[in-house]
Image (spheres, rainbow, N blue to C red):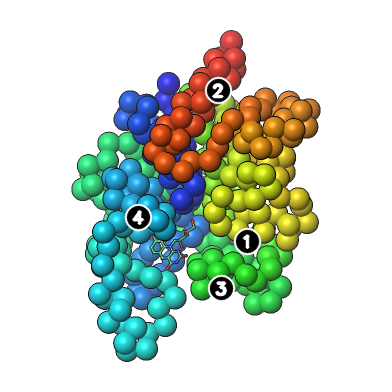
Amino acid sequence: MKVVALAGGVGGAKLVNGLSRILPFDNLSVIVNTGDDFRYSGLYICPDIDTITYTLAGLNNPITGWGRKDETWKVNEERETWGYPSWFHLGDKDLALHMERSRLIEEGYSLTEITRYFSKNFHISQTILPMTDSIVRTMINTRELGKLAFQEYFVKHKFQPRLTSIELDGIQTARISTEVEAELQSCDLVIICPSNPFVSIYPIISIPGIKRILNDKTIIAVSPIIGGKAVKGPAAKMFEELGMASSSYNVAKFYRGLIQGFILDRADETEVHLIDQWGIISMATDTLMSDLDSQIRLAKQVIKFGSTLAKGNEA
Ligand code: FO1
């Protein structure tokens, strides 16, 4: 069974890592959010692509979830002595990757080509694809500070300003790449990873060509909310600021019309019958991925559940 996973950063990377241990490498592709990408210190940074890449290469920092393990910070420290406002921390090895990507972008290579080259360099066999080669930027409108680019909101202001709405600059003219189109067309199952629905998944499913293909696919989503709380990041806070309770039920509601299946944590099992009412088949299991074993265990359950739905849709 050919699987495409839609993913943002850390939460997505954990499930993708589990999937990579149980599926043949040529049966797994990951389409990654690039709405968080930005230029910093003159460099082209793609945080979510890099988190997925480092994770599949076994090089990710297990404490932060982003960046490299066994990292040094000499360049960052040196720049801080010059008074450089380094609110976004770049380790030395990570920096080398951003420098190389920036050089290749300057030379005219697409993000899809560069991501493939990096994967090859790190001996990753699965396919990692940016959601688009067009420039789409997630902008966060806030009560206190107005419109902020995603990383300013997320890292610089530690997602403290209150969100009023989200905009995707460039979305109207964004184009699906031939690689994303081919992977989606040929897959049997799409898995929406337990990433933030608003800022990690919404940008991907908003790319005009992607949305069109998804309408014909079997899609299941895994909730990033457990017992009303986000495992990491601002998802729970965003639900509340947008006037909704932070719950798996509201995650399923957000994906209503797109997904056929939904996986939520046992802590939220009482929400299953509410979600089923919308014709979404849901399943409760342990969704917290605190180590490799739990990533693999969840991945197995996701594939088993997804296969049943995909076969049902074929019949
Ligand atoms: N997140 C932080 O909270 N602080 C950082 O200094 C930081 C640096 C960073 C460098 C490279 C990279 O690929 C990711 C980095 N992140 C950092 C994570 C990133 O900003 C977010 O986790 C994602 O954009 C949200 O998915």
Mark closest to the chain's N terminus, 1 or 3: 3
Mark closest to the chain's N terminus, 3 or 4: 4
- Rendering coords of residue 164 (x, y %): 71, 65
Disc 1 versus disc 3: distance between alpha carbons? 18 Å
Q: Are marks 3 and 4 in contact (CB under 8 Å)?
A: no
Mark closest to the chain's N terminus, 4 or 2: 4
Disc 4 versus disc 1: distance between alpha carbons? 30 Å
- Type of amino acid at the residue the image marks with label 1: Glu
Image quadrant, ligand 1:
bottom left
Mark closest to the chain's N terminus, 1 or 2: 1
Please tell me whether mark 1 or mark 3 is closer to you in this view: 3
- The response on whether ligand 1 sits within 8 Å of label 4 is no
Q: Do the residues labelled 3 and 2 touch (CB within 8 Å)?
A: no
Judging by the rendered image, the residue that carries numbered circle 2 is 305
- Rendering coords of residue 176 (x, y %): 47, 45
Element type at mark 1: strand
- Rendering coords of residue 279 (x, y %): 73, 26
Judging by the rendered image, the residue that carries numbered circle 3 is 157
Q: Using the rendered image of the protein, determine whether residue 172 is visible from the camera's viewpoint.
A: no
Q: In this view, does 128 lie to the left or right of 32?
A: left
Judging by the rendered image, the residue that carries numbered circle 4 is 61
Disc 1 versus disc 2: distance between alpha carbons? 33 Å
In the displayed structure, 308 sits above or below 72; it is above
Label number found at residue 282 = none
- Type of amino acid at the residue the image marks with label 2: Phe
Please tell me whether mark 4 or mark 1 is closer to you in this view: 4
Judging by the rendered image, the residue that carries numbered circle 1 is 167
Q: Do the residues labelled 4 and 1 touch (CB within 8 Å)?
A: no
Disc 3 versus disc 2: distance between alpha carbons? 39 Å
Q: Quadrant of the C terminus?
A: top right
In the displayed structure, 224 sits above or below 156; it is above
Please tell me whether mark 3 or mark 4 is closer to you in this view: 4
